Image (spheres, rainbow, N blue to C red):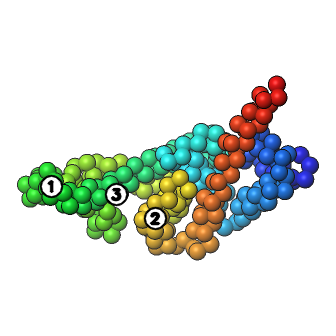
Amino acid sequence: MQNTPNYNALRAEGLFDAALDPLAAWSPEWTETWMGLVQESQLSQVLEPKLVALIRLTIDVTATHLYAVGVRRHIRSALKLGLSRAEILEVFKLASVIGIHACALGVPILQQELADAGHVADDKPLAERPIATPVCDLMRAQGQFNPLWETLYDWDPDYLEKFLDMATEVWKNGILPALWIELLCIAGDATITHMWAHGTRRHMQAALRLGATHAQILEVLKIVSLQGIESCEFGVALLDESIKQSVA
């Protein structure tokens, strides 16, 4: 298309498809300005291209978004860059861990509401429970245990132990670098469909301990901010279809 060199280049690379062609035709200047931001993230040397592809995949595959068009596109991009099936699978496993946020958010609220209503939770004193929690214990010793999990640990330590045993496997198997995992977690928690501030902060702290720079973390957030273009990707195609149907 004329007057949209950035968009044309990104289309040629497979980062976008025909869904945005009408937008480029209807509003070329706006489209080109936006695509300049995307192009900048493509050319930046702050993060490795493979990691950038996995960040984009994380944003679209997270349970708060589940944008299949983007997931498919970013899988192709990741494979083209040489990422393995095992590495891509780790992103899906890591994104699944976001489910614990339901408990991190909801259980403390439930605890407070029970107290306000004069109810007592149906839990037994910890001393009466012969439940070993080695994963939780190790995370406590390493300073990684989330304080928002404390009440869940009191009420159902077996569930939390099993969940964390599953969740921490990504950190243990060495398929992805530890720093990459933390940066991917930042992306998943900061994504505009989730915006989980507590987790974003915790994973930023972990990334900094692993040697992440200000520029690297900022680059993750900039990539996440570009998720908004999917509103156009989704809506423009429907608008174009509706216009064609109305004049048919």
Kind of residue sitting beneath label 1: His
Q: Give the secondary structure at mark 3.
A: helix
Which-is-in-front pick, marks 2 and 1? 1
Outermost residue to the front = 246
Disc 3 marks which residue?
Answer: 104
Disc 2 marks which residue?
Answer: 197
Outermost residue to the top = 248
Q: Give the secondary structure at mark 1.
A: loop
What is the quadrant of residue 41 in the picture? bottom right
Residue at horizontal 25 percent and vertical 48 percent from the top? 159
Kind of residue sitting beneath label 2: Ala
Looking at the image, residue 212 sits to the left or right of residue 17; the answer is left
Q: Position of residue 162 (x, y in %)?
A: 28, 48
Residue at horizontal 49 percent and vertical 68 percent from the top? 204
Q: Nearer the viewer, residue 248 or 234?
A: 248
Looking at the image, residue 184 sits to the left or right of residue 45; the answer is left
For marks 3 and 1 on the same chain, the one whose residue lies earlier in the sequence: 3
Q: Which of the numbered marks, if any, corresponds to residue 164?
A: none
Q: Nearer the viewer, residue 44 or 24?
A: 24
Residue at horizontal 90 percent and vertical 53 percent from the top? 3
Q: Position of residue 176 (x, y in %)?
A: 51, 55
Q: Give the secondary structure at mark 2.
A: helix
Kind of residue sitting beneath label 3: Ala
For marks 2 and 1 on the same chain, the one whose residue lies earlier in the sequence: 1
Disc 2 crowd, CA 10 A, few/some/many (<14, 14-19, 20+): few
What is the quadrant of residue 105 in the picture? bottom left
Placement of the C terminus among the 4 image quadrants:
top right
Disc 1 marks which residue?
Answer: 119
